[in-house]
Image (tube, helix red, strand yellow):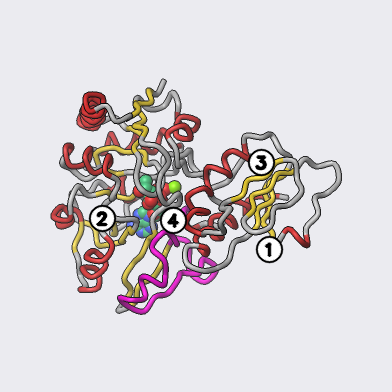
Amino acid sequence: MATVAHRRGDPDQHDAVIERAVRLLRIGEVIGLPTETVYGLAAGAFNPDAVAKIFAAKDRPRFDPLIIHLPHPDALDQVATVESQLVWDLIQAFWPGPLTIILSKRDVVPDIATAGLSTVAVRISEHPIFREISATFGQPIAAPSANRFGRISPTTAGAVFEELNGLIPLIVDAGPTRHGIESTIVQIVEDRIEILRQGPITANSLRKLARVQTRNSKKFPITAPGQTSSHYAPRTRMVVVDSFKNFSVPRGLRAGALCFESVPDLPIVRQLSREGELREAAANLFRMLRELDNEKLDLIVAELVPEQGIGSAINDRLRRAAAGFQTNG
Ligand code: TXA
Ligand code: MG
């Protein structure tokens, strides 16, 4: 049974929650923690047994590597080597924050954390609670999103509870996460920034530092399941449409809508942003998808958002969420 520890402005309770979280990390447990993107499933990165528990709780295949979260930038040298000035420029511009950088790994990082790769994915969260726990723990933390493998990433403590209750001892509740989608993942290739996963740091903001290329999964070999087409999947069958205007629900099906601009006439509707704001839409995306998934519908119909800014990361998640259903019928 997971305990959900709330932080509600009471300083005594705050300290007790932080202390308990750190104690559990020190004894090699895995716990649910808030970050600015989505909730993470955290364990001490240098403890292979603790890292193994992450894979077990998520039911994640061992070939899918984890992101390592540093307590502070000085810890980078412990886990990775930096071979290009561009990496320092990225760190300067975006850390702490929702940018994960793929670097050459040092031997102290256990192979289980990186699935045997010679590279390691690294970031520093800017979430105040994550930072406090991570600073007190003092060592790098391995933390993938706190969902069962292939499922919708959790953006609230309640969603982590839904996914992992009974499998972890503690979930630290700090309310809904700010960005709502996972960090942008980049890798430096020659003098370019290659985006492996789109996220809150957009191609446009990266373009200020160097040439940017978004990896097209059709052209490049898949290196990790996060880049496979089917991911973030609800249990309910799901399709994406360019617009509800040209879509009608097959007769007899009870359908729900995830919409952005137009609000369709369906029994259950979630609108990503009433103001038409893409940042707000991203923050609501996984929570609303999860709510629709819990409505026992026959079909979820999601409308794609404009391909601008964070909109392309939203569309990427929507397409992947629907992908498994398109191939399996
Ligand atoms: O916002 C986030 O990044 C959240 C929060 C909790 O930090 N974490 C997260 O982790 O989304 P996860 O494990 O759900 O997604 C990490 C992705 C996976 O698709 C994994 O395959 C990829 O990063 N990855 C990890 N290490 C890699 C590496 N060395 N090379 C290429 N891809 C890597
Ligand atoms: Mg994930």
Tell me which label, 2 or 4, sits earlier in the chain: 2
Viewer-nearest of labels 3 and 4?
Answer: 3
> Quick check: marks 1 and 2 in contact, CB under 8 Å?
no
Tell me which label, 4 or 1, sits earlier in the chain: 4
Residue beneath disc 4: 224
Residue 264: x and y in percent read 73, 52
- Badge 3: how crowded within 10 Å, few (<14), some, or many (20+)? many
Look at label 4 and name its amino acid. Ala
How many numbered marks have been drawn onto this rendered protein structure? 4
Residue beneath disc 3: 236
Residue beneath disc 2: 96
Measured along the vertical axis of the image, is residue 114 above or below residue 41?
below
Does the Cβ of the disc 3 residue fall within 8 Å of ligand 2?
no
Q: Is residue 63 visible?
A: no
Measured along the vertical axis of the image, is residue 188 above or below residue 47?
below
Look at label 3 and name its amino acid. Thr
Decide if residue 120 is on the left or right side of residue 55: left
Query: Magenta region: which residues?
Result: 197-226
- Badge 4: how crowded within 10 Å, few (<14), some, or many (20+)? few
**Callout 1: SS:** loop
> Quick check: marks 3 and 2 in contact, CB under 8 Å?
no
